[in-house]
Image (cartoon, coloured by chain):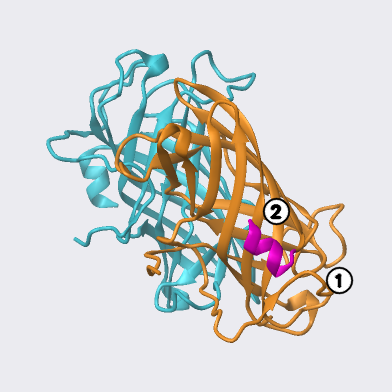
Chain colours: A cyan, B orange
Amino acid sequence: MSTPTVIYGRPVTTEGIPNVYAGAEVIPWATPDPGIDNLGITSVDTFAVPGMGEYAVEFEGFVRVVRSTPTSREWASAEVYTNLIEMKMVGDSPELGRITVSLNPECLSAGQIRTPFDPYAGEGPSAKACRMAVGAVFALPKLGLKLVNKEPIILTIDDVRQIPPAGAPGKGQIYRMLPLNDIEHLDDAPVAYVTSLRFNMGGYLTEEQIGSM
Amino acid sequence: MSTPTVIYGRPVTTEGIPNVYAGAEVIPWATPDPGIDNLGITSVDTFAVPGMGEYAVEFEGFVRVVRSTPTSREWASAEVYTNLIEMKMVGDSPELGRITVSLNPECLSAGQIRTPFDPYAGEGPSAKACRMAVGAVFALPKLGLKLVNKEPIILTIDDVRQIPPAGAPGKGQIYRMLPLNDIEHLDDAPVAYVTSLRFNMGGYLTEEQIGSM
């Protein structure tokens, strides 16, 4: 396994950290011990391909996220750091073919959960904000392409009332367009853009479910 | 000069590209020859420092941006790639002291100007969108800190009717918080966050103005 050269956030160790699978209890407003969360995820990503068109694609898959020891046992002041250590999402598009999204091993995809500086009306009392900066590989075998993002995709979940925020909707904070580059020609013009990304964190999966995806 | 290890976009050569200073004419809806634009810039950045507070700081300074040869002479289809090759912005805060923002030499700060996939009402006909992903160093000598962002700051300008978009307002696309890390302790928790960033691109400066800043 290669060492990432692009570090998007705080590294979190996986050493000695247990996997957490389906059946684990999630307690609202509590700061859990560190763990590797094995969670389902679905998303709808929209891709603009210059000269071809714009396509919304539904994805389904899983993520594995390592969580740090919380900086405090008290919910309100606790911060938790996260690294996305594995991801596989698959979607099918009539035009683009099958698309498989995985992590870019060149990047450390990292994030955190903390109390926001700008709580908004409608957020629960003491709700937290979750964010993750992700470097991904989009494999499109039909087009013979593997695409990567050179700017991280910022995935956010608001109104977080439990850790992990399983079951919560989230958004990729993409302003108009996020360039995707051919992994074989990184210095050339982007060949596609992500123009929108909405996701839902699922619940815990079993080890067997993860293995079969 | 060190070679950047984190490449946020398409590299643009500076070799043989002339500097453009005050007095140069900017023609709307036209695709100019490549150049290095020497432009004024002002911004208001808001910083949240956990344990201290949140502070809005006014900055003033300059940027030097190299522009590529347009991919087409026709405005509507042309794409222009940009690299931010120099930046100096200075602001003063009663609480944080003087803050000087410059480029992080570890990063290639890069962007592009192209026709957006999602034109909105109010944008001029055939207006373009400008975006730039920036790695910066925030020097705060009063606090004895140099801070860097590990996720790029995405600066955007909409409704672009001329290249460069001198005189246009822009925004840093920051969702709630963008972490800043102590350059000496990159793997530790962030020590501050940018929570908002609004800027205005100024016009061309003279070589003397750039030299005196």
| Label 2: few (<14), some (14–19) or many (≥20) C-alpha neighbours in 10 Å | many
Determine the main secondary structure of the stretch shown in magenta.
Answer: helix
| Label 1: few (<14), some (14–19) or many (≥20) C-alpha neighbours in 10 Å | some
Q: Nearer the viewer, residue A140 or A136?
A: A136
B149 sits left or right of A32 in the view: right
Q: Range of the magenta residues?
A: B205-213
- 2 or 1: tag closer to the N-terminus: 1
Quadrant of residue A136 within the rendered picture: bottom left
Instruction: Give how far across and how far down residue B112 sits, in percent.
Output: 63, 67
Quarter of the picture holding the N terminus of chain B? bottom left
Residue B185 lies, with reference to residue A58, above or below; the image says above
Chain for numbered disc 2: B
Badge 1 amino acid = Pro
Q: Label 2's element? A: strand
Quadrant of residue A21 within the rendered picture: top left
B175 sits left or right of B170 in the view: left
Instruction: Give how far across and how far down residue A201 sits, in percent.
Output: 43, 37
Instruction: Give how far across and how far down residue B189 sits, in percent.
Output: 34, 34
Residue found at x 74% / y 77%: B77
A20 sits left or right of A156 in the view: left
Tell me if label 2 and label 1 are in contact, CB under 8 Å. no
Whether the magenta-drawn stretch holds residue B211 is answered as: yes
Q: Which mark is residue B213?
A: none
Badge 2 amino acid = Ile
Q: Which residue is mark 1?
A: B28
Q: Which residue is mark 2?
A: B41
Chain for numbered disc 1: B
